[in-house]
Amino acid sequence: MTTAERQALIAAARAAVGTAYAPYSEFHVGAALLFDDGEIVTGANVENASYGLALCAETVACALASHAGRRGGLIAVAVLGGKHGVVGPVVTPCGRCRQVLNELSQLGRTDPLVLCVGADETVEIRLSALLPRAFGPANLA
Ligand code: THU
């Protein structure tokens, strides 16, 4: 990933925060996925009056990418957010999102770099480090 791609990915995640539907937690999150053809797919969290049904930003982005026909090629992810959309401490993907991201990454045999962006620091970590020994499509082959 080039410096320009990295900046564009973080900017896309930041822009996606604005489309979050999070009236219950008021915690607005944006996620952006960078693919090996340079395209970026974004998502934001979608909450529900039945609180437990909330969809995280990363999961929404993966679903949109899948619906657009993506079946791999995921090279990097950016995620950020905070209360009322103000970026605060680093946001790392929740457990379910790690598994959802793993599906897309394993399909294309990539190990995306996950940029967890906070106001004061950015944590860069491979998905395989966030979800070691992941269960994925290969297990069902
Ligand atoms: N959330 C995300 O969208 N991504 C994360 O990585 C962490 C949490 C959302 C889910 C919920 O709508 C809100 O943040 C508070 O947990």
Image (spheres, grey):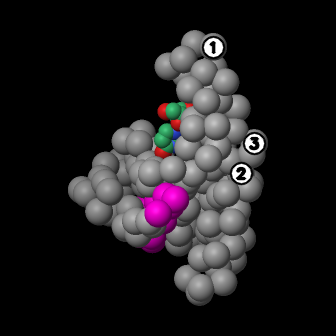
Residue in the picture at 51% in, 50% down = 88
Within 10 Å of the Cα at label 2, are there few (<14), some (14-19), or many (20+) other Cα atoms?
A: many
Residue in the picture at 73% in, 56% down = 15
Q: Tell me which label, 3 or 1, sits earlier in the chain.
A: 3
Residue in the picture at 52% in, 59% down = 119
Q: Secondary structure at mark 3?
A: helix
Pick the residue in front: 120 or 17.
120
**Amino acid found under the numbered disc labelled 2:** Ala
Spatial distance from mark 1 to mark 2, Cα to Cα?
21 Å
x, y percentage for residue 49?
Answer: 63, 13
- Residues tagged 2 and 3 counted as in contact (Cβ below 8 A): yes
Q: Secondary structure at mark 1?
A: loop
Quadrant of the snapshot with the N terminus: bottom right
Q: Quadrant of residue 95?
A: top left
Q: Quadrant of residue 13?
A: bottom right
Q: Is residue 111 magenta?
A: yes
Q: What are the residue bounds of the magenta stretch?
A: 106-120
Q: In the image, is the residue at mark 1 within 8 Å of ligand 1 by its beta carbon?
A: no
Compared to 30, does 105 lie above or below? below
**Amino acid found under the numbered disc labelled 3:** Thr
| Left or right placement of residue 78 versus residue 42 in this view | left
Q: In the image, is the residue at mark 2 within 8 Å of ligand 1 by its beta carbon?
A: no
* Residue 16's disc number: 2
x, y percentage for residue 106?
Answer: 43, 61
Residue 106 appears in the rendering = yes
Name the residue furthest top: 50
Mark 3 highlights which residue? 19
**Amino acid found under the numbered disc labelled 1:** Ala
Mark 1 highlights which residue? 49
Q: Is residue 84 magenta?
A: no
Q: Secondary structure at mark 2?
A: helix
x, y percentage for residue 105?
Answer: 47, 62
